Image: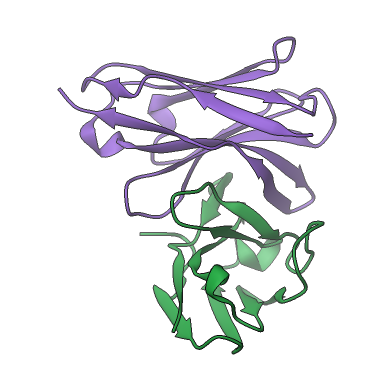
Chain colours: A purple, B green
Amino acid sequence: QVTLRESGPALVKPTQTLTLTCIFSGFSLTTSGMCVTWVRQPPGRALEWLARIDWDDDKYYSTSLKTRLTISKDTSRNQVVLTVTNVDPVDTATYYCARSRFASGSHWHDYWGQGTLVTVSS
Amino acid sequence: QSVLTQPPSVSAAPGQKITISCSGSSPNIGNNYVSWYQQLPRTAPKLLIHDNNKRPSGIPDRFSGSKSGTSATLGITGLQTGDEADYYCGTWDNSLSAGVFGGGTKVTVL
C-alpha cells in the first residue's frame, strides 16, 4: 500500500535552513504521472501548497516562497527532500508530503503523510 | 489570502444536506479540475473528490462534487457527527504554475 512519512527537526532557529525528508513506499517516482507535493499548515490555519516534483524531475514552487524553497528527489531511496532557507517564526507549521497526480489540468493529492510539526523559535 | 474562496463555516443538523462552495478564476478552476479534502481534527487531509466529481475507492456516495465555470461545490448528504471537519478545495493555477487551496470550511453538525 502507499505510505508517506515526513521527517525533520521539530525546532529550528530563525535564519537557519530547514531540511525535510519525505520517505515513501508503494509507488515509484519514476512512473509517468507520479508527483510528490509538500503542503504546510500553520497552527489553526489553512493548507498552503509549497512545492511539487514530478516523475520527470520537473519542479514547481509557490510563487511567494520560490526564492527560499528547493525540492529534490532520490528515486533509488524513494525520498523527496524540501529545504526552506532563512526560516522565520511565521514558517512554524505542520509540514505534509503527499503523493500527487497531475495530467491535463488534473491535479490532486491522493495519499498524505501524517505531517511533522516544525517550530521556528530562538 | 487564499486564491480560492470558501465560506469559513457551514452548519446543519444530522441527516441534513450541506453544500460548500469554492470560488476561483479562469487560470485555476476555470481551466482545471478541482479536488476536495476532508481534515478531521488533528489528522492529515484526506482526498474526498478529484477531477471535479470523482470519488476515490472507499469514499461514500454521500459526498459529491460539481463544477461550473470558475466555481466548484462539495455536497454532503445525510450529515453525520463524524463529518465534523475542515474541508478544503484545491486545484492547479496556470498563471502561478503552482497548486492552490481554498481557505477551508469548518463543518459543524448541530
Percent coordinates x, y for residue B61 in the rendering = 77, 73
Residue B93 seen in render: no
Q: Quadrant of residue B50?
A: bottom right
Q: Decide: is B27 above or below A38.
A: below
User: Left or right: where does residue A85 sit relative to residue A98?
Assistant: left
Identity of the residue drawn at 55% across and 77% down: B20
The foreground one among A16 and B38 is B38
Identity of the residue drawn at 46% across and 60% down: B3
Q: Decide: is A122 above or below A47.
A: above
User: Left or right: where does residue A27 sit relative to residue B4?
Assistant: right
Residue A2 seen in render: yes
Percent coordinates x, y for residue A119 in the rendering = 28, 30
Identity of the residue drawn at 64% across and 78% down: B76
Q: Quadrant of residue A111?
A: top right
Q: How many marks?
A: 0
Percent coordinates x, y for residue A3 in the rendering = 69, 32
User: Left or right: where does residue A2 sit relative to residue B38?
Assistant: right
The foreground one among B74 and B102 is B74
Q: Quadrant of the N terminus of chain B?
A: bottom left
Q: Decide: is B15 above or below B97.
A: below
Percent coordinates x, y for residue B25 in the rendering = 55, 68
Identity of the residue drawn at 58% across and 82% down: B19
